[in-house]
Image (cartoon, rainbow, N blue to C red):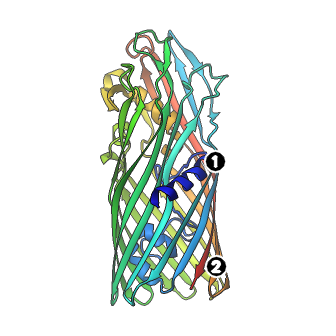
Amino acid sequence: MFLKICSCFLGLFVVMSGVVHGINGANLIGLTPQSIGAGGTGIALNTGFESLAKNPALMSKNKTTQFFLGANFAGLDPQSSISYSGPVVTANTGFVRNEATFFVIPEMGIMAPITDRITAGVGLFGTAGFGVDYRNETAENGIFSQLRTHFMSLQLIPGVSYAEGPWALGVSTRITYGGLSLSAMLPDGTGNPSTIQQRGGGFSDTFSAGFQVGGSYDVNPTTVLGVSYTSSVPLTFKRIFDFDRNGTYDDFNFELPSELGVGISSQHGDFTFSTDVKQIFWSETQGFGAMGWKDQTVLAMGVVHDWLPGTSSWRMGYNYSPSVVGDKMDLSASNGYYAFGSGQYLDSSIAFFNLVGFGPALVAGQSFTLGADYRFSPFFKLDLAAEFILPDTVSHSGKTSLAGPDDTDAVYSAKNEGLIVSAALTWAL
């Protein structure tokens, strides 16, 4: 049954989407309107169905059986630029838009109290991704190597929570379906920089699993503390790319990062304020760590106002995460080699993969969010949210080696901005 569900959702990904661009590295700040509208918070704030993914302990605060169906719609403007100045190549592309600018990701699930103390649920979410598409480049004269990258993860998350007095504990399993494709026209290893070949092995997919544990404590009737830990999820993609240029497609070990977060929410009259701080451990992962990604400290803040108690409320929030690579100005062939796949790459080559191939995920993320809900009846609710991703740019510059060691000045830059709209319906019994 799980394979059938994943096949249906994968079809929706392929037909309706480009690729996912989050602002917390490769991760979306939130998965449902309840969290997105409140700045991506949810470790100590009850966000209904998304408690499965934010902090499973908070499922205990939902006392009715709920069915959930929603989707996220994103329109983004990821761009990259490359500048070379040397004896072999002199070029300045300016910022070039790639073809991956829109996506739609559906999500669904159910949550129900089993006893007065135990609540269980299961949800299916698209949780992370990135990608670019420069296959039709023309004016750039091959500078972007016709690069195409596409990574996404789809997670089935069953979870359960147990509450005892002011305390609650939750645990969930993240059964993960991951998909990755890498393709690029790159030098073939003969030593002639003008001799290139397609090095990508097409699309590869895989299954893996991780877990999440969370806890919450009601300090008093209006204040809640929360903590959550999510394990890493290792993914191995078979025959994905010829990294070492030996004519054989190599496997690539990729890993979704572990996360540790704490949160607090406090109610004051009709207003509830929430703050989350979490650490995302990109540097410790396979794949992302090899590309020099740094750990992120993410700050999320939100406010919920019961505008018409029992009928309607509105939300607003702010989310910030620093770039996973940051600006860099010392690219050089003498800086050592990075183990990437089964090959060894200069840091200037890694800068190309990062800023051009994964650029939209690398830009420092600042978002302002708005959201609202309306209860048509005690059993039926509509939630809406919008995330406004502010424009930002990250650049790596220095020397690269196109004909000889450090013979060419190079600048790689990426920028991104956009809008994500989220909508969901909830039925309660």
Q: Secondary structure at mark 1?
A: helix
Percent of width and height locating residue 180: 47, 41
Residue drawn at x 53%, y 20% is: 84
For label 1, count other residues whose C-alpha is less than 10 Å away and answer few (under 14), some (14-19) or many (20+).
few
Residue drawn at x 34%, y 82% is: 162
Amino acid type at image mark 2: Lys
Question: In terms of depth relative to the viewer, which is nearer, 345 or 266?
Answer: 345
Amino acid type at image mark 1: Val
Q: Quadrant of the C terminus?
A: bottom right
Question: In terms of depth relative to the viewer, which is nearer, 369 or 238?
Answer: 238
- The residue identified by callout 1 is 15
In the image: residue 264, left or right of residue 107: left
Percent of width and height locating residue 260: 34, 62
Tell me which corner region of the image, top left, top right, bottom left or bottom right, holds residue 227.
bottom left
In the image: residue 359, left or right of residue 417: left
Tell me which corner region of the image, top left, top right, bottom left or bottom right, holds residue 159.
bottom left
Q: Are marks 2 and 1 in contact (CB under 8 Å)?
A: no
- The first of marks 2 and 1 along the sequence is 1
Residue drawn at x 44%, y 31% is: 351
Residue 381 shows which numbered tag? 2
Q: Secondary structure at mark 2?
A: strand
